[in-house]
Amino acid sequence: MQILSLNVGSSSIKFGVYDMVRETAVFESHVDRPESVPAAWSGILESLTQAGVGPIDAVGHRIAHGAGDYARPVLIDGVVEAAIEHWTPLAPQHNPGNLAGVRLARARWPGIPHVAVFDTAFHRSMPAQASTYAVPEAWREAGLKRYGFHGTSHQHVMEAVARHIGVPASSLRIVSCHLGNGASVCAIERGLSVDTSMGMTALEGLVMGSRCGDLDPGAYPYLMRTLGLSAEQIEKALYEDSGLKALSGISGDLREVEAQALLGNARAQLALQVFGYRVRKCIGAYAAAMGGCDVVAFTGGIGENSPAMRRRICQGFEFLGLHLDDGLNESYRPGARLPVELQQAHSRMKVMVVRASEEWMIARETFGLLKQSGNGLVPGGNSSIPVAVSAHHVHLTQASVEALFGAGYQLTLEHELSQAGYWAASETVDVVAERGRINRVRVLGPCRETNQIEITRTEACRIGIDAPLRLSGNTDDTPTVTIVGPAGKLRSNGLIVAHRHVHASPADADRLGLHDGDRIEVTLGTSAHTTSFADVVIRISAGAALEMHIDTDEANAAGIPHGGEGVLVRADCLATVCRCHGSAQPRPQATIRGSGPASF
Ligand code: ADP
């Protein structure tokens, strides 16, 4: 099973494909400073193709801000996409890019699970004393809270350090320093994040490439009043024109700042001092907050690559028992797969470098969720099926079309449906029975040999008819209703409630281990809200698009949003095969007499 991880950051897009069975990276790459995610997208796909990575079974997405909504990874659907968009004001440099990646990837791989892994999730363990801002209650109720970021990276540091030392994380106090273009420090006490330097947004805390870090809140009204700056101007400057970039006047990239500092540039030297000092303060504070510290760990582009910055940060911590070994620090070569210790032999506290591995962590979390939701994913394939919600509609013979719309009338194609050869017509009819009427029922094309009227159980009750549950094409002994068109009306049998079913091509069926006529059980929805449907009939035909069709009653029962005018609306939800009874199982055949054309 291969999982693609997509980590859209503020200054880069990192991505990787991981074999979850062998637990190895198949391919890893990144795009530095892309103009935008859509602009970089074709290059990403191209590099995956060139690397020959093979089929992708699921995609894990790094999502920066999930606020308090998500403590764990979730399957992405429309609701999750809306939440990511909703929290954009709290992560304006991240969530829009994350969402763009989600949308592009879901469009490229529509039939597989996409999982959101939130940066904020690891910090949900922060106690109130660390996560609460001392502001009016109404503001706190409006969401002002310290959420923290880089959670996936800090969690990875914790696990890697504990594994390396050979003790459980629950017996360690770690200060994890993720120093990259964005930077944060995290206090991890006995396996839990208890404080972190980023707060409600990714601006708080350390000095970063172009972000300011801590700033007296009194500065904002001052800037507004004295410089006449708007909130938008201030926000943009704090994210994009502050940090190392502003201090050095050179760049937000530490490499360039360090190079200029070595040449004697005073602004660059000050930038390094402010950057290092802020990290030092934070480490000291977190050691105090945890009542001690066993390991200070560095990760991220700066943490892994700049021995000078590590030295700057670590100096003066001898009173806490931290003694950096300058030789080990200088000789460390980035990229080591395992954590490397850089402290002197007698140092009570360890100093380590841990190679950042957010993409692997995202893949692992994604895999974990898929396994946990018990969706029957099998190595080398996936069992997820796109879902479409079918609203009431009719199939008509050409003779009926002429009776309802006029002699010689031809249906007008309005739009194609996902199943090749089937389309929604512009025309609608009314379906009338003794106790009621269903207006504007869409006609589907092309014309058929027999009329068939598909409505929901709720509608059948409303018009007072006991419509049988049938697979499309089986209209023997079905009730008769009146169909009313603009040019006439007719009486016709063929009223059914469509049996939920899955369309599959022979190749998809093979991959999923399904046979025509199988009745399977599937789970629909996200990990937060799932509904199981038993007795879903498999319909295999050449060229069929893999899709599960349920009607609006069933969608409502499963809490799947649909709506709009569409006759067959692709839902933001995947069905996952949980149990296949297989063709060998005795199947109740009563409702599947005949096997006419598939419903769409
Ligand atoms: P992010 O994931 O936040 O986009 P990274 O963790 O990839 O950022 O870190 C990128 C930053 O790491 C660069 O902007 C640069 O400041 C720093 N960096 C990378 N290589 C070096 C190096 N050899 N020396 C010093 N700093 C480096």
Image (cartoon, rainbow, N blue to C red):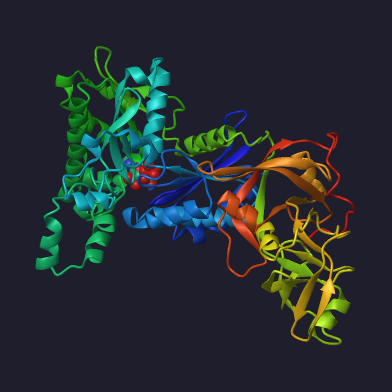
Position of residue 359 in the picture relative to residue 169 (left or right): right
- Residue 264 makes an appearance in the image: no
- Residue 344 makes an appearance in the image: yes
Q: Quadrant of the N terminus?
A: top right
Residue drawn at x 32%, y 19% as measured from the top left:
172
Position of residue 267 in the picture relative to residue 465 (left or right): left
Residue closest to the eye, 336 or 565: 565
Position of residue 165 in the picture relative to residue 384 (left or right): left
Quadrant of the rendered image holding ligand 1: top left
Furthest toward the front, the residue is: 434
Where is 138 relative to 535, above or below? below
Q: Position of residue 367 (x, y in %)?
A: 56, 35
Based on the displayed image, in which of its 4 quarters is residue 353 positioned? top left
Residue closest to the eye, 547 or 507: 547
Furthest toward the top, the residue is: 346
Residue closest to the eye, 63 or 555: 555
Residue closest to the eye, 235 or 475: 475
Where is 105 relative to 404, above or below? above
Residue drawn at x 23%, y 49% as measured from the top left:
140
Based on the displayed image, in which of its 4 quarters is residue 93 positioned? bottom left
Residue drawn at x 19%, y 28% as measured from the top left:
289
Q: Position of residue 565 (x, y in %)?
A: 61, 70
Position of residue 211 in the picture relative to residue 501 (left or right): left
Residue drawn at x 80%, y 54% as measured from the top left:
470
